[in-house]
Image (cartoon, coloured by chain):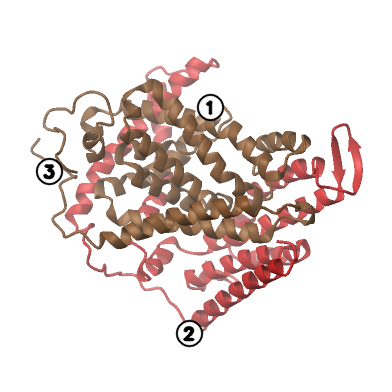
Chain colours: A brown, B red
Amino acid sequence: MASPSPQQPSLLLPEAPKRRRLLEILGAASIIVTYVVLVLTQPADIAAGPGSLAALAALGGFLLGAVLLVVAVLPTLPTSTVVLIPIAMVLNIVLGQFVGSTLVPFYLDAIGTVLVAVLAGPAAGAATGALSSIVWSLFNPTVLPFAAGAALIGWLAGGAARAGVFRRFYLVPFAGFLAGVLGGVVSAPIAAFVFGGTSGLATGAIVSAFRAMGDSLLAAITKQALISDPADKAIVFTVAALLVYALPRRTSFQFPFVRRYRVLAGRAPEGREPAAKA
Amino acid sequence: MSRGTLSLERLNPLTTLAVAAAVAVITTAAGHWAFSLAVLAGLVGLTLRQARAAVVLRAAAAILLPFWAALLLVHGLFFPEGRTVLAVFGPAAVTREGLLFALDAGLRTGVFVVAFLLFSFTIRVPELLTVLSARGLPPRLGFVVVSALTLLPAAAQRIRRIRAAQEARGLVIGRSLASRLLAARLQAVPLVLSLVHESGERAQALDARGFSGRQPHTSLRTVPDSARQRAARLVLLVLCLLAVTGRVAAALLGGRA
């Protein structure tokens, strides 16, 4: 253990944490307020066309929230976490396509985000989710408005890890299911108001079924999201947990978050005793 | 690289971003299919003048064709708010309002997708990040984005190598779910392990070079900008504000939201 740890505490003075905190709160508030406003003021009569004010509010509010969160969180993360974020983005895309093409018709596009959230905490998870959507939008712009939903999934995964869910494997799919419920509910207004419905044929068929029963557009899309998202996220959380368990202990316990909150069961390998403060 | 007089590649990336955002905001605020159609036609015309027109249009078609099909399925057949019924197939009814809704939402999304693809395929990402960090965005953002974009092809290449190595060890992907799961595990675990391990080494190298320093970073890259482009960005911002204000005023005065 002669080599220096990449997690050595920085000797530099902390930089204006209050401003960062304020940005974080503003980002979260922007997302919550946008959601509440959208649900409360949803256009009652959509026969005249997709509501343009609701679309503008959904686009602006959610995107602003995601960008503020990234700007607030990114400078506070240790270097070992920052270098993990691009890897998570790559895993989201590569594993998502790969698993999606070999196994089941799910998206599974958040495996990397959940992996980072488990290793580095809720803030890192939220930043990874939002950034992943922003980078992916360079190839597919329709992903961009969903950045807030992706950030929420990362944040919830980190919260679950902090609460010790990943110490007991059987709890992981349940945590994923619950995160999927919340993520689906937040993403539904974007699908409804920005894109006038859905982005895929399979999900479109489910939306059509609820519309045939006379549901409003937002209700039909929320119900569709409540069918697909929880199952999708339960699988994503499980796969991410299996990948974290497969990492050598020396690698997973090098992350201060894992040691501090005893995210994984078992003891830290020798020389990696729980840090007093991370 | 650039061709024609309207090449967007010569512009400052911030100007291209401003144009894409303004086009999306103004079209959404206008909220009329005819306006969206005119803007979409204009964007396609502009795309055809670019050197990478084929790439942009192919990417846009790959996104938009399934999207339009889904919209037509959802609103074309089931639109409970529709009043003018054109045809009835059992529980499904084609209504004029439903078709117009699908047309409106489809064209609006078309404008959004083509505008932003035109932006992302005509800028150089490092230039955009230089400009953004000069305007106060964290420099780490630049590292994360560029690093993800360079890692992506490398990771795709690595997963092919891992697969070849596992096949050399006797991996045969059968048709059963268990066999596929095992194959997924045998490929995903080495990929994740090697990427996470490398990231630890990269963190040490970056820290040794003052990555976490809080002093302003000097950029070696200068991105050309001009007074005309600055003025154009300001005009676009004003136009966006006017469009949104106009839409809010119309909603408050009793028009549709």
Nearest the eye: B117 or B135: B135
Q: Secondary structure at mark 2?
A: helix
The residues tagged by marks 2 and 1 sit, at their Cα atoms, a distance apart of 53 Å
Spot occupied by residue A203 in the image (x, y as percentages of width and height): 65, 36
Q: Secondary structure at mark 1?
A: helix
Is there CB contact under 8 Å for labels 1 and 3?
no
Amino acid of disc 2: Ala
How dense is the environment of label 2, judged by Cα within 10 Å: few (below 14), some, or many (20 and up)? Answer: few
How dense is the environment of label 1, judged by Cα within 10 Å: few (below 14), some, or many (20 and up)? Answer: some
Give the chain of mark 1: A
Q: Quadrant of the C terminus of chain A?
A: top left
Give the chain of mark 3: A
Could you tell whether B71 is left or right of B179 in the image? Answer: right
Could you tell whether B239 is left or right of B193 in the image? Answer: right
Q: What residue is shown with label 2?
A: B227
Q: What residue is shown with label 3?
A: A4
Q: Which mark identifies residue A102?
A: 1
Spot occupied by residue B157 in the image (x, y as percentages of width and height): 42, 39
Residue shown at the point (47%, 17%) measured from the top left: B172
Give the chain of mark 2: B
Q: Secondary structure at mark 3?
A: loop
Nearest the eye: B85 or B1: B85
Amino acid of disc 3: Pro
